[in-house]
Amino acid sequence: MRVVKLFIYYILGLIGIMLVSVAPSSMGRGGMLEIVPLFQELMLFIENLFKAETWIYQLESYRENIITFLWDPYMYSMKILLGAIIIGFFIAFVLAIITLYLPKLVVAFIQRIMNIFEAIPDLMFAFMIQLLIVYIYKQTGILVMEFTTFDEKIVALPMFVLAVLPTVSFYKIVLMYFEEEKREQYVEFAKSKGVKFSGVIFKHIIRNMAPNALFHSKIIIWAALSSLFVVEWIFNIQGIMYYIYAGFRPMVIAMALFYVFTPFFFIFSIAEMFTNQRIEGAGVVKKRKGGMKEKVKGMISALEYALHPLVHSKLEIHKWGKGTANSLIPYFKNMKFLIGFLFLLGLVLMSFYQSYVVEDTVSQLRYTYNEDGTLKGGPPHPPSEEQPFGSDRLGFSIFDQILVGAKYTIIFATIIALLRIVIGAVIAIPYAFLIKGKFKRFIDKVVDSMHFIPLTVIAYLLLYPVLWKGPNGWGYSEVERIAYQIVLLTVLVVPLIAVLVGNEVKMLFQKEYMISARTMGGDWLHIVKTHIMPHMAPRLGVLFGQQFIQVLLIFVHLGLFKLYFGGTQVFYGPIKTPPTSATYEWSGLVSGMKNEMMTTKWWIVYPVFIAFVLSIIAMQIMLQGMKEVQQYRIGVGIPNMKKFRRKKREKPEQKQSSKQEAFTFVHGGNTSQHL
């Protein structure tokens, strides 16, 4: 029976892939995604599957069956991808265990290094490695690794570059769960019985955190698949992702995604067989009487708490706003949160000032002249007093473009990340409490199919018809294009976030304090407000940081293929000019970086990458501050905060004692007379 169910879930995943593959055809030129044309194209695609000519890959006069033609590129890509994932997860897991034994100063240093690696976009990291290899070769004559390919297949360097993001992300996740498990009572109990700490780690902690780590690993692999799409482009690798972009036919896209989806689906399905029983076992709730009616009623109260400002009357908005402001005060008292917030806010304010106050929003310098009036040169201009970061190939100031585009990049990346987390968390509440059994497993498997389809590929296929300006102009206004991109990049990820958070909430229900709360008669609103939200807040904070970074990386990846946020301005005149961003957002400066970084025109791309890195680091600092505040609220003390609070409490006690010493009875005599 399990085999039959697994096969059904696999078929559902393949149908989802077919929908993604036919989506560009259903949208046409300049159209948005619509349900009816999408399913019409799907039925036509399924009908064509039974035609022999559909299974032929044709390039000019060359013809070959698609299955055999894509097999070699697929195996090449999977060597790189699986090698990167295995190496990344292994290093992250071992390093997380070692970290538990290290002093706090060393741990803090390792975490800073990890944050720096996470902040560097995979694209920039790959080019930095290539430049480093070239530099070593010029200095020593030793070629450390082959970093580009035409006929020969390179594996080591792309695998190394691709392994960075999984290593950093998985290390942070594993370390977070290790720290949470260390605070559980069973750890102290086992140590008091003489069990060594290493025994506690390998026999208890790893087993308890494995299901949560499995949930997060899907998100990490999903991000790695998007990075593979870019790594193949950087290293001139004609792997499976190359043919998705180059072929752009529904059959080629579908077959390539089938190849990628299949192994990961079965690997994770087998792994979940060992964890699902434990997650489903968190069923204290189902033993309570009251049935679905009680659960739905409780869910309404819990959702009202989550969506308080949207469902309450206007008279309570002031009260809610005051309560929200009071809850945010501790965050702004945290120096880390404040520094990161002020940096991002400062960039956004400077961007609005540059856009709406400065007369020449983006200055353009066509030619420069010497002091004697002779022509010095044309664009791109190197950094100078007039243009501090130089100019692009059309003479537009890089500095001005970064300032103007900052508001679009930072604000909309934050909005998309917030929408993903908020909507996903709200959906996760009824998903965790109300949906059980076969229906829950059905939803899990349908959503699982999305984990193994690269987000960059989906985004490119669905955004290209809308964002690319055609010969007849835009099909939609700028506001409509931005709204469509926000909705699409949010909707594609919300199901994954909802399932991830919902499964973590289910794991929380196994905790003893949750069982006690239900036994003592706690309702759903009380459980969500008092127990679930305080413990989920640090995890949601980490998840928000990951989503913010992922959105920025998606912007960078799409920028490589000249697909910019808000639209790509394309010129169809007799003079060929490169496509530009309609909003000057940062990914518009990335498109030509492959050529610029290998030439002396480094100033065209380095400033925008530094802007990306600094923004990611600022968000990381904010999240670290948020994590400290949340940990202190649930009883995990932060040394500096404890010291501050202790000093603050000691002052009134000293004043009170001094008053008692200064007290004297109005009527003298023995003290015992007054007792």
Image (tube, rainbow, N blue to C red):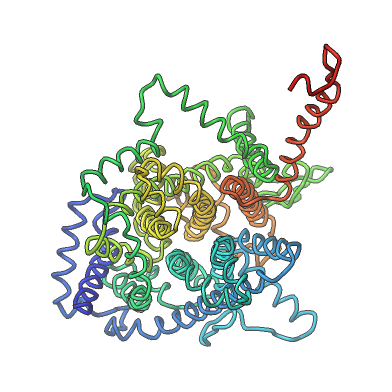
523, above or below 589, in the image: above
Q: Is residue 66 visible?
A: yes
Q: Looking at the image, which residue is at 41% across and 30% down?
A: 309
Q: Position of residue 464 (x, y in %)?
A: 37, 55
* Total labels drawn: 0
Q: Position of residue 283 (x, y in %)?
A: 31, 59
Q: Looking at the image, which residue is at 29% across and 71% down?
A: 254
Q: Position of residue 628 (x, y in %)?
A: 63, 49
Image quadrant of residue 179? bottom right
**Considering depth in this image, is 398 or 147 the residue closer to the camera?**
147
Q: Looking at the image, which residue is at 47% across and 57% down?
A: 558
Q: Does 20 sit left or right of 94 as displayed?
A: left
18, above or below 621, in the image: below
**Considering depth in this image, is 444 or 287 the residue closer to the camera?**
287
**Considering depth in this image, is 93 or 140 the residue closer to the camera?**
93
Image quadrant of residue 405? top right
190, above or below 389, in the image: below
Outermost residue toward the top? 666
Q: Is residue 392 visible?
A: no
Image quadrant of residue 449? bottom left
Q: Quadrant of the N terminus?
A: bottom left
Q: Position of residue 350 (x, y in %)?
A: 64, 35
Q: Does 251 sit left or right of 51 as displayed?
A: right
**Considering depth in this image, is 572 or 500 the residue closer to the camera?**
500
